[in-house]
Each structure stands twice: as structure tokens, then as C-alpha cells.
Image (spheres, rainbow, N blue to C red):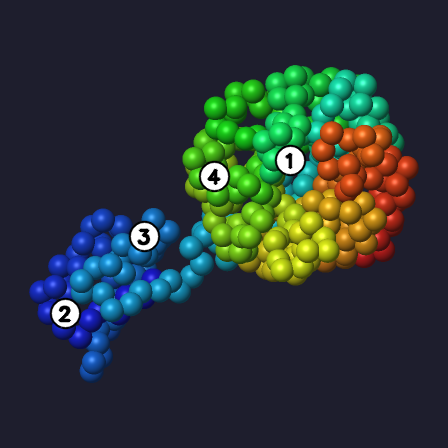
Amino acid sequence: MIIVLKPTCTKEQQHSFANMLKENYNVKVNVWEGVHSTVLGLLGDTTSIDIEYIDAQSVVESVKRVQEPYKKANRKFHPENTVIDIGNGLKIGDGSLHIMAGPCSVESESQIVEIAKSVKNSGATFLRGGAFKPRTSPYAFQGLKAEGLDLLKIARKETGLPIVTEIMRASHIDMFENVDIIQVGARNMQNFELLKELGKTNKPILLKRGLSATIEEWLMSAEYIMAGGNSNVILCERGIRTYENFTRNTLDISAIPIVKKLSHLPVVVDPSHASGKSWLVEPLAMAAVAAGADGLIIEVHNDPPHALSDGAQSLTPEQFDVVAKKVFDLKNALK
């Protein structure tokens, strides 16, 4: 961190300010005195320093970071890719490709079990399904909640597929004890109290990018979880809001190699929410794999026209079978 002091700052004020920084933040302060200004260079872990607080001090002209504010998620401090062990031989980030497939919402036992068996036969390695559903409209189907979690566990018992499902609030964490991967949805990406509580668990967390979040904001949300002690974070690019309204969102393919360069965390892509259109899922999934994604999360429903949520972007099991074969063929060709 670089702090430029105002020309009016006295020696006494300079020493007092520097001592405060050393004592409060446990950093080393180097001082460079120029003709017109004095610059303080802070060395050490500056992640806990509130840059706005420093900037508000009467002796400070300007302040800026010389490194990214995220440390634990930063590849500079962790050059090797993080590999997350889900169990049963499944690892995300080891170079293999995983597909998390299933309905937007769990609707019934027969529905979720039928879909789970189908997607497994097509090569899916995880079952995704929403038990708690955040919806734009308060009148839309909100999910089966705790019952939905129980139905996912039944489907897991029937197929052996680990389950991925979304959490809405910190008070629900105990209910997710037997969930294999806890998903944090785009709307909760900056629910910092939830992220802090998830940081106290050892569960793999699938962190979706917020609708209008920058890549740095996304990584800072991952930092919240990791700062709490949980390093099992999987990033999920699911499209961002732009001025284009033909698609539900705009899939940021460039985010995949960018995040891979900036961070060591694995990245999966959600082409279903990115497009909102089932016919776009295949090309976007192919593009994501080509760009280096570690996995895909795809919505599959056995009767999309009658789905209780997001039927327009859901593939039928037959369509999913075709897409899965193509993306696995592409992954093999890229090796």
C-alpha cells in the first residue's frame, strides 16, 4: 500500500501517523521524502486495512494498493491450482471436467430421482437441484425447502451422485450438513454475514458471480469465505447483466482465463442461467470448456414446459445427453 502525505504534514504528524499504522496493523512503514511530498510504503499483510479510513485522515493526500486486496484467493500467494476433494474419488480442479446437472427446482421425489438417474447415465458427476429458491417475484414458486433437501438425499442414495444445492441464509447451515457442495447464489454473493459463517465450515462452496459484480468483487467474496478458514471454494461464472436483453444475462467467457490467471481456485460455468434459452446452452457450454472451465452446471428437466421454475432454459434429458457427449469429446480433444 502506498500513502502520499499532504505537503502540510509536519514531521511530528508523520511520525505519529506512521507509528499508528505499525501498532494497529502490524506492518512495516518505509518513508520516502521528496521535494514536494512524503510517501509512506506499507509492507506486510494490508488486507485488514480499510483504505477509505486511511484516505479520510487529515494528513493523507492519496492512498492506493499496489497489490490486489484478496490474498488467500490470489495465485501470487498460491501458485498451484487448488484441487477440491469432494470424496468418492471426485476432485474439482485437477484437470478433469465435471458436469453438475439437474432441475432448477426439486418438485417431487419421482421427478428428482428420474432426472438424477438420467443425467448420471449421460455422464453427469453431480446432481444439482434447488430446494430453497430465490425468485424475483414473491408469487413465484419458492422451492420445497427442507423437504426438497430430503428429496435430493433420496436421489443421491438412488444414484450415488453428490448433491449441489443453494443456501439462502446463515441460519440454514445446520440443515446443509449432509449436502456435498453448498451453492451461494448470485444474489447472495455479497451477503457477507452468510459468507463469514460458511467460512467456518469445511464444506465445498460453489460461489456464483453476482449479476453486476466485477471479477475483483467476486474474488473478494471468495476471500470472505477463505478468511474464515474454509479454502474449499469453487467459483461459478453464470453471466452478468449488460445492456443486451436478447439473453437473460451475458456469459463472460473472458472471466474464465482471467480468473485462472488471478486465482488458483477452480471455475465452473452455468450456461443455463447465462442465456435463459435452452438452445444456447450447448454452444455456451462448448465455449466454456474451450476457455478452460473445470466444470459446467446445467439445468435439466424431464418436462420443461411444465417446470415450476426456469423451464425455458432447461434441457430435456435427451438434449442433455447430446450436450454431455459433445463437451466430453471436446475436453478429450483439448488434452
Residue at coordinates 65% horizontally, 17% vertically from top-left?
147
Q: Amino acid at mark 2?
A: Cys
Which is nearer the eye, 221 or 333? 221
Q: Which residue is disc 4 drawn over?
A: 191
Element at badge 2?
Answer: loop
Mark earlier in primary sequence (4, 3): 3
- The span from disc 1 to disc 3 (Cα, nearest Å) is 34 Å
Residue at coordinates 20% horizontally, 80% vertically from top-left?
36
**On the picture, is 23 further left or further right than 107?**
left
Q: Nearer the viewer, mark 1 or mark 4?
A: 4
Look at the numbered discs 3 and 2 and tell me whether their residues touch, using CB distance below 8 Å.
no
Q: Is residue 296 visible?
A: no
Q: Amino acid at mark 3?
A: Asp
Q: Nearer the viewer, mark 1 or mark 2?
A: 2
Q: Which residue is disc 1 drawn over?
A: 85
Element at badge 1?
Answer: strand
Q: Amino acid at mark 4?
A: Asn
Q: Which residue is disc 3 drawn over?
A: 50
Q: Which residue is disc 2 drawn over?
A: 9
- The span from disc 1 to disc 2 (Cα, nearest Å) is 53 Å
Q: Quadrant of the C terminus?
A: bottom right
Element at badge 4?
Answer: loop
